Structure formats: C-alpha cells, structure tokens
Amino acid sequence: MMDFYKYHALGNDYIIIDPNKTDIYINKENVETICSRNTGLGSDGILYGPIFNDGKIKLRIFNPDGSEAEKSGNGIRMFSKYLGDVGYIKERTFSISTVGGEVSVEIINLKDGLIKVDMGLTTFQSDLIPVAGERRKVIREPIKVGDESLEVTCISIGNPHCVIPVTNISQERVLQLGPKIENHPIFPNRINLQLLQVLDRYNIQIEIWERGAGYTMASGSSSCAAASVAYELGLVEREVKVYMPGGEIDIDIKPSGRVYMTGVSNAVAEGMFLQEFKSILMGKS
C-alpha cells in the first residue's frame, strides 16, 4: 500500500495519490508541500484518483500551486498507464471523468506507455474559454501586454489556452510572456500560454507556460490547443506532430472538431512518505 506513485510524460512529471491506498488528505497546502522540488517530492502537479463514483473513474488534477485544473492531456495519459499498471482496468478502452469533461482512452501499448486520448471538442467562443468582453470568437485578436501589442488566438479544450504564433520560438520568450499572459485581466480564470512556430503543414513546435505551474517541458492539452489553432488559422493539416522540449505528441483533428492525442508516458517511482513528512501533511489537513 503505497502513499504515492510518480510518472512522467515527456518530462512533465506528476505524483499520483491513490485515495484507495493512502489516507493522505489533499488540499491546497498539502499539494504545494508535496510538489515542492526543494522540500517535497517535486512534481508538476498531483493526480488524485481513481475515485469510483456510479461505476465511473473520476480523476482530480492539481497544479503545484494547489489550484485545481480542469484537464491535463499528459496527466490523463500518466493516470491511464497507472490504472493499467496496477490492474484497475483490463480493457484497452475506457473513460475517465475530469472537471473539464469525460475523456475516452485507448491503451495502444501498456508496456511502452503509448496511449491515445479523445480530448473532446474545442471552442474559440470567448465566454466558454473564458475571455472577458462581449461574446465572440477569439481569433487573431490584439491584446496589450505591458508595452507590447500581441496577436492571440484563444481556445478551450476543457481548459483555457492562449496561442501566439511566432517566427522564432524560444524558451526565453515564453518565460518572459508567461506570467504576464497567465494573469492578464482579460482572462478571469487565468490561462495557459503556448508560443507556436509552424515548421511545415504537418509539424509544429511549441514552448509552454502552464497556469499554476510555470514553464513546462511538455503538455498534452497545450499540444491539442496549439495544433487546433494552427489548423483554424489555415497553417497546417488535420494530422500534426507537435514538438516540445520534452518530446513529441501526435494530434489528429477530426472534421467535427474533436481532437485525439497520442503519446507516451512512463512510470518512475513508488513509495511511502516517512512519518516526519507525513506528520507535516497531516498537520495541514
């Protein structure tokens, strides 16, 4: 009976806390403590589940700042591999419920961690992302960020994203813009940022700043969002490979607007919290 399991997907790492195996209480303070890379285990977030409810598998996703995320493509793949690794599921296809909606999962190869996820439908409608102002599609819209005027396209795939096409992508640029865009007053629930560089009609490259997490080596939902924006702007075809510092993900955009993501995830470790650390968590419950 382990307290935690650690997985990563292309360098995006999460701690899985299984409520069926541990009595660790999850709240904002405990999430921050566990995710700290200096005084805790260190991770880009916590996956809390499986929570079994009316025959459904529910997953809660937490950012390292303790806020709860609606959806995470990489998180869903890691959690799906965990479900297969420990024997919760035997089928190749199943569903997971998240705050951002229900997703369908297909395990292509459990040993290799190759998993395909139906991430659902996208929307560019401002009130559904959300983006402040009158109801509209947020496509190629100018916004002011400090002294800069930038052109953004915003999209939701169960969680909010702001995509900025660039000609020269860099980590330095996303680190500069990330905190400003995430907390821009036009985004009432904050937002994830992707800088997008189109390599050709079938390949794109992105740099990512995640809401509540900061700079991230890879992100499944960001890959879906950036590919969908590139397709909406007429820059790519429906099947796109997305390159990130941590690796690559394949995206398939259906005519209906439904987006499928295929990528790998890997198990890293499992273990118990020592009593000294556990007493800190219990004290914050």
Image (cartoon, grey):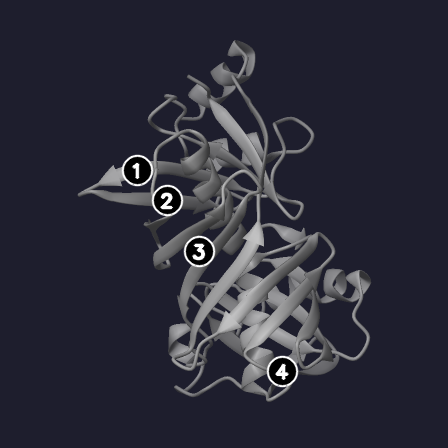
The answer to the question of whether label 2 and label 1 lie on touching residues, with beta carbons closer than 8 A, is yes
**Which residue type carries mark 3?**
Lys
Q: Nearer the viewer, mark 1 or mark 4?
A: 4
Q: Of label 1 and label 4, which has the lower sequence position? A: 1
Q: Of label 3 and label 4, which has the lower sequence position? A: 3
Crowd around label 1: few <14 · some 14–19 · many ≥20 (10 Å): some
The answer to the question of whether label 4 and label 2 lie on touching residues, with beta carbons closer than 8 A, is no
**Which residue type carries mark 1?**
Ile
Crowd around label 4: few <14 · some 14–19 · many ≥20 (10 Å): many
Q: Position of residue 37 (x, y in %)?
A: 67, 33
Q: Residue at x 60, y 50 (%)?
A: 213
Which residue is the site of mark 3? 71
Q: Secondary structure at mark 2?
A: strand
Q: Nearer the viewer, mark 4 or mark 2?
A: 4
Q: Of label 1 and label 3, which has the lower sequence position? A: 1
Q: Which mark is residue 59?
A: 2
